[in-house]
Structure formats: structure tokens, C-alpha cells
């Protein structure tokens, strides 16, 4: 593997709507209307009255018992945009820091992979770690302020996936997956060597369904 354009893709808050999944778990635990729990405008969930220890407990509950990661809503346009980028020869590398729940790694990994398969999201490899600058990629997309800052300090090209809690960052920013696709297409066009699309599959994000059912 050499010369390809590698796109490092975050999951929560970028491909998957973590907020909606976590909100439903928290609302049940607190006995409140989910609609009363607004989207965060700052990083974290202190505006819900949840401190760090409470978040860790509720997140662990959501992941290991409620199997939240298997059922998160997918961001609009994400699968098709990633398929089109893959067809252009972009190497999709999923990079996620989901293994911070002790004793829940098996559930986290299996539910993450099942979610990716269910939503037909193409990827060449997947990395579970928090130190994202250590993962090689030509460009990254992330929503978390600490990740954006760390990656840019390390000299990497980072697209900020627009969220209310990351508006302080200037530079490349995308408010939708259509904008992400446009930015990465332009960056990848400057790279001569690219990987061919995933073999044996035709066009569209539902191509895996058709391929598996013999309809492709």
C-alpha cells in the first residue's frame, strides 16, 4: 500500500449521530422527555447536568447494555458520499476512540462493525485508538475540538465537521457530507496514485445488498 490518498474518518458526530442515541438512553435513566435534552453547544454534556463521572457511567450503560453503537442514526448522505470517494480511489480509514469503556471492548468492536455493515459504509481498514495523530492519513475529518487541535498541531490536514461546539476553528469545514465529498475529491485529485474501487460491486451505497442477494 503506497501512494494512495488515505482519508481518516471519525465516526461519532461525523458518520453516526451519537447525540440522538445517547439522548434516548439518558432520558430513560433520568425519567425526562428526550426532547428536553438539547444538542450540546459546548463539548460535553454538562448542560444536561451530567458531570464526567456520570457521563462515563451512562456511556458504559448505553454501549454495553443498551447496545447503542449498533443502533445510532447515520448522518445524512454519509454512505453514498464515502462510496463515491472510494470509487475515485480514496482509501477510507475509519479512526475512532471508542475503546475507552473498560470491559466493553468486544461489544464495542462488534457493534461498530455491524453498524458499518448495516449502513453499507465502505472502508479499507479501521483503527480503534484515541491518539489520532499517530494514524497515517493524508486528510482527516473530525468534530471533537481536542482531536482537531491535536491533528492540526501535528501538521495534518483536517476537515472540521461542523458542530456548534467546534465553531472556533478556522480553515477547512464541512456542514454536510456533500461538502466533505467535494473537499476530499479536490484534495485526492492532486494525488496521482489511487486505489481502485472495492471489487465486484456496482454503483450506489446499496450495492452490497444487491451483491449479496445476487442482484448486482
Image (spheres, grey):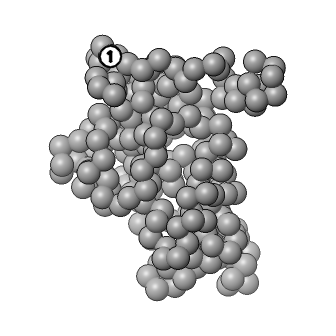
Name the residue at 29% across, 26% down: 2
55 over 92 or under it: above or below: below
Name the residue at 76% across, 29% down: 212
Percent position of residue 185, x then y: 41, 22
Percent position of residue 196, x then y: 47, 17
**Crowding near pointer 1: few (<14 within 10 Å), some, many (20+)?**
some
Pointer 1 residue:
193
The C terminus, quarter of image: top right
216 over 39 or under it: above or below: above
The N terminus, quarter of image: top left
Name the residue at 43% across, 56% down: 128
210 over 111 or under it: above or below: above
- When asked about the image quadrant of residue 89, the answer is top left
- When asked about the image quadrant of residue 72, the answer is bottom right
- When asked about the image quadrant of residue 21, the answer is bottom right
Percent position of residue 200, x then y: 63, 19
Say which of 213 and 40 sits in front: 213
Say which of 74 and 49 sits in front: 74
126 over 112 or under it: above or below: above
Say which of 37 and 112 sits in front: 112
**Residue 160 as seen in the image, left or right of residue 156:** right
Amino acid at each position: 500500500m503506497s501512494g494512495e490518498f488515505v482519508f481518516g474518518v471519525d465516526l461519532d458526530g461525523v458518520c453516526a449521530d451519537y447525540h440522538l442515541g445517547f439522548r434516548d438512553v439518558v432520558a430513560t435513566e433520568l425519567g425526562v422527555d428526550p426532547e428536553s435534552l438539547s444538542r450540546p453547544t459546548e463539548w460535553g454534556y454538562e448542560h444536561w447536568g451530567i458531570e464526567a463521572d456520570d457521563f462515563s457511567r451512562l456511556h458504559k450503560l448505553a454501549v454495553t447494555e443498551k447496545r447503542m453503537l449498533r443502533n445510532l442514526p447515520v448522518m445524512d448522505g454519509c454512505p453514498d458520499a464515502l462510496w463515491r470517494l472510494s470509487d475515485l480511489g480514496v482509501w477510507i480509514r475509519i479512526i475512532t476512540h471508542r475503546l475507552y469503556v473498560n470491559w466493553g471492548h468486544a461489544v464495542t468492536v462488534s457493534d461498530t462493525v455491524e453498524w458499518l455493515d448495516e449502513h453499507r459504509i465502505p472502508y479499507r481498514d479501521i483503527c480503534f485508538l484515541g491518539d489520532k495523530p499517530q494514524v497515517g492519513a493524508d486528510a482527516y475529518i473530525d468534530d471533537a475540538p481536542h482531536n482537531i487541535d491535536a491533528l492540526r498541531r501535528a501538521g495534518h490536514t483536517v476537515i472540521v465537521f461542523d458542530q456548534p461546539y467546534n465553531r472556533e476553528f478556522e480553515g477547512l469545514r464541512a456542514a454536510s457530507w456533500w461538502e466533505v465529498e467535494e473537499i476530499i475529491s479536490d484534495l485526492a485529485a492532486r494525488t496521482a496514485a489511487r486505489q481502485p474501487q472495492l471489487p465486484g460491486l456496482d454503483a450506489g451505497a446499496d450495492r452490497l445488498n444487491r451483491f449479496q442477494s445476487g442482484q448486482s
